[in-house]
Image (cartoon, rainbow, N blue to C red):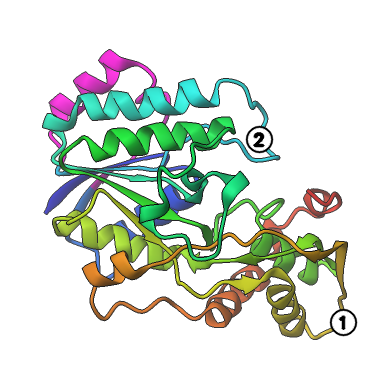
Amino acid sequence: MKNILVTGASGFVGRNLVEQFSGLPRYAGGYSIAAPSHRELDLADSECVAAYLKARRFDAVIHCAIKPGHRNAPDLTGLYYQNTRMFLNLLRGLDSCGKIIWLGSGLVYDLRHYRPLMDESYFGVHVPADEAGFGKYACARLTELSNNVIELRPFGVYGKYEDYAIRFISNAICKTLSGLPVTIRQNRKFDYISVDDLVSVIHHFINNDARHPAYNVASGRPVELAEIAKTVVELGGGNNGVRIAEPGLGVEYSGGNVRLLAELPGFEFKPLRAGIEQLFEYYRGNRYLIDPALLADDR
C-alpha cells in the first residue's frame, strides 16, 4: 500500500481525490491517504512542512493546495508569494516524499497569447504577466530542474464539489434546476475534462515514472460554452434560455494532449455530454446543496 499525502483536500480536486482513492474499488486498498487540514499542516511554514514529511515518509505528494486567484476569491493579495512558497517548501522535502505531482494550468502559457490546442513546447515562449500565471510559471520552471516532480496542466475541470457559483458547467446546471437562464459573458471554446479523468491520470503517475516534467491534461476536443449551455438546458427540459452578454467568439482555451496519450496508451476521456449528464443527476439528487443566493449574480 502506498502512503500518499494530498494537499488542499478540502478543495474541489483534493476532495474528489481523497474520496475516490479511499473508496472506489479500483483504488481502494492501494493507498493510505493523509489529508491534513491547514491547522494540521501549514504549507507556508518551512519547518512544519519539513518535519511533517520527514516523520511520515510519503511515497507521493499530490499537491492541490492553492491560494485562489479567481473572481470569487476573498483575498487576491500575495498570490505569487503564497503559492510559490507552498510549492518550494514541498520541493525542499522531496527526499522524504518519493515524488511530487502538482496541479498547474494553462495559465503558464500566458493568457495574453493563448492559441488553440497549445502543446507543451509552447511553454516559455511567453512569460505570464498576471500574478497567478507567473506563480505557476515559476513553479513549472523549477519542475524542469527537478527529478521526480511532475506538473499536470488541466485547462477546464468539472465535477461535483466545484464552486457552482462561478464554475461554468456546475453554474449552468444549478441555474437550470433553479429555473434561471444560463448566462455567458462571451462565448468561447474551452477544453473541459471530468474530475474523474483527472483522478485517473494522477493515479497513473503515482504508479509510473514520467518521461517528461509536464503534461497537458486535456481532451483535445474544445467545445463552445454556448454548446455546453444548450446541452444543459436540454437536460433540464428546454424551458430555460441562454443569455450571452457580448457578441462574437472569445479567445480559445485549449491544450494538445499528444504527450499525455503517448504516456497512457488506450486512455480515453469521458465524453463531455456523458459527464454533464452525470453531474446534472448529481445536482438533481442533491438540490439542497444549491443556494439560490449564489446564483443571483452573474460572476
Question: Which residue corresponds to the image point at 50% horizontal and 25% vertical from the top-left?
Answer: 80
Question: Which residue corresponds to the image point at 70% horizontal and 69% vertical from the top-left?
Answer: 225
* Other-residue count near label 1 (Cα within 10 Å), few / some / many at <14 / 14–19 / ≥20: few
Say whether residue 167 is visible. yes
Looking at the rendered structure, which numbered label has been put on residue 73?
Answer: 2
Q: Is residue 163 above or below residue 199?
A: above
Looking at the rendered structure, which numbered label has been put on residue 239?
Answer: 1
Residue 103 appears at what percent x and percent y?
Answer: 39, 46
Q: Is residue 186 above or below residue 2?
A: below
Which sits in the foreground, 128 or 210?
128
Residue 229 position by quadrant: bottom right
Question: Which residue corresponds to the image point at 75% horizontal and 79% vertical from the top-left?
Answer: 230
Residue 282 appears at what percent x and percent y?
Answer: 59, 70
Residue 35 position by quadrant: top left
What is the total number of numbered labels drawn onto the structure image?
A: 2
Range shown magenta: 33-58
Looking at the rendered structure, which numbered label has been put on residue 143?
Answer: none
Q: Is residue 224 left or right of residue 239?
A: left
- Whether residue 43 is in magenta: the answer is yes
Q: Are marks 1 and 2 in contact (CB under 8 Å)?
A: no
Which sits in the foreground, 117 or 190?
117
Report helix, strand or loop for mark 1: loop
**Mark closest to the chain's N terminus, 1 or 2:** 2
Q: Is residue 47 left or right of residue 7?
A: left
Q: What amino acid type should be assigned to the residue bearing mark 2? A: Ala
Report helix, strand or loop for mark 2: loop
Residue 139 appears at what percent x and percent y?
Answer: 36, 34
